[in-house]
Amino acid sequence: MSAPDATTIPTLTQECRATLKLALPLVLAEVGWMSMGIVDTVMVGRLPNSAVAIGSTGLGQSLYHSIAIFGGGLLLGLDTFVAQAYGREDLEDARHSLVNGFFLALLLTPVLMAAALSWPMLMQVFGISPELVEPMRPFLHALNWGTLPLLGYFAVRRYLQAVNVVRPITFALLSANLVNAFGNWVFIYGHLGFQARGITGSGFSTFIARTYMFIVLLITFLWVESRRKLPSWHSAMRLEIDRIAALFRLGLPAATQILLEISAFAAATALCAKLGPMPLSGHEIALNCAAFTFMVPLGVSSAAAVRVGQQLGRGDSQGARRAGWSAILLGCSFMSFAGLMFVSFSRFIARLFSPDPAVVRVGASLLLVAAAFQLFDGLQTVATGALRGTGDTHTPMLANLVAYWFIGLPLGYFLCFKLGWGAVGIWIGLCIGLIIIGSVLLYAWNKRSAAGLSRRASVRSKGKRFG
């Protein structure tokens, strides 16, 4: 199957409906995840010296997430293993994968926390102004306490969505926004007898919200499993080095791909920080908006990984192809619409974040650049999920490495500092990188779906159950 043709359109339409049914709750969950960061930015933006507050919070979030999301990415192998096990009706094997995913999360936590604590020192070495680094330091420490519950949330979520339990994930994320907003009100500004902690209070609020998310999904997981007519969990509660190694082998390229992408935007944030608080705050506005729209194809990407994996577990390569193409169609459609909204309402959107006209001007100009790469951002995100469902996590990793770090960021640096284009030059570099990644991953999925899925399903069904 090189691409959907006229004879496949009715079937593809049916597949779009099935994919959307799974994807919509995951999309809402991803939007809920991103909303927490946006609410944090808006609420600290009302503190005195708005530009510094927004810049420090955004820099801390970008740096912390580049570490924590890498750890979560190492658990992405659960998408493939649990979805394929569920497709072949082997829930015992799916349980084994989740338990060993928890073991992997426990091993990762101290390493990730230590890495996150090193960021303030590295930012000083990089030459970032103490005006931004010093308020960021306690904020980052507060965020760091949420590392273990965050990894626990990632593990349980991957299991639940791979077995088609998605609505509780949506509830956990959306309700966590209420917890986070209330915590911000209490800890940032000092209400209900608590001390006003400024942006550090936002870090504590995020930690509490992430702990809440993990607890909600853990309760959901225990309830779902209690209703299954399966043997007790005693046999699943064991450490299996081979299974952890298999999860790690599949998760490492996926985590590296996420790290390359997130750290590329973190590097762009650091470069904008060298320009001063005003360009940095405008950058944070555009970054929050682009990240918000990105959550929609990210949810579709998770659905693509699950549906492609489940179909391969059943040995249905045609169904896997339809699942991938339908998800790509959904993701690209939404991101095209998002790009039009950025073009039409750039200044209005920027004003939602800050009343400062200078900040609004920078943010609006960067939103126009973000509009140009929306389609390709959606394309690369959903194609990554579809490829992950087949077990291919290396291709997206290599595409991100080359396009961001060998092309996009160097070009952005040149445009920003050598030609004097400022933050707009950095964003143009990111835009070029995303166009390349989206084009490469579409080609990779097209090639794999045309020739490789049938063999892949056959090989996996005859190999070890966990990889």
Image: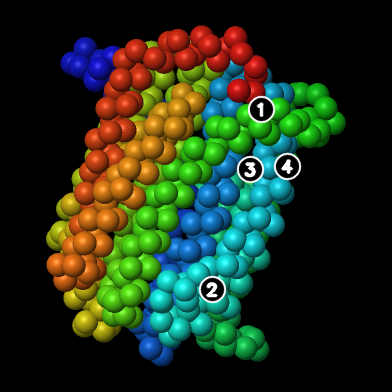
Amino acid type at image mark 4: Phe
Eyeballing the image, is 3 above or below 188? above
Circle 3 — which element?
helix
Camera sees residue 69: yes
- Residue designated by label 3: 156
Q: Position of residue 76 (x, y in %)?
A: 54, 38
Figure quadrant of residue 41: bottom left
- Residue designated by label 1: 94
Residue placed at 73% from the left, 42% from the top? 103
Amino acid type at image mark 3: Val
N-terminal label among 3 and 1: 1
Verify CB contact (< 8 Å) between mark 1 and mark 2: no
| Image quadrant occupied by the C terminus | top right
- Residue designated by label 2: 121
- Residue designated by label 4: 103
Circle 2 — which element?
helix
Q: Residues within 10 Å of mark 3 (few under 14, many from 20)?
A: many
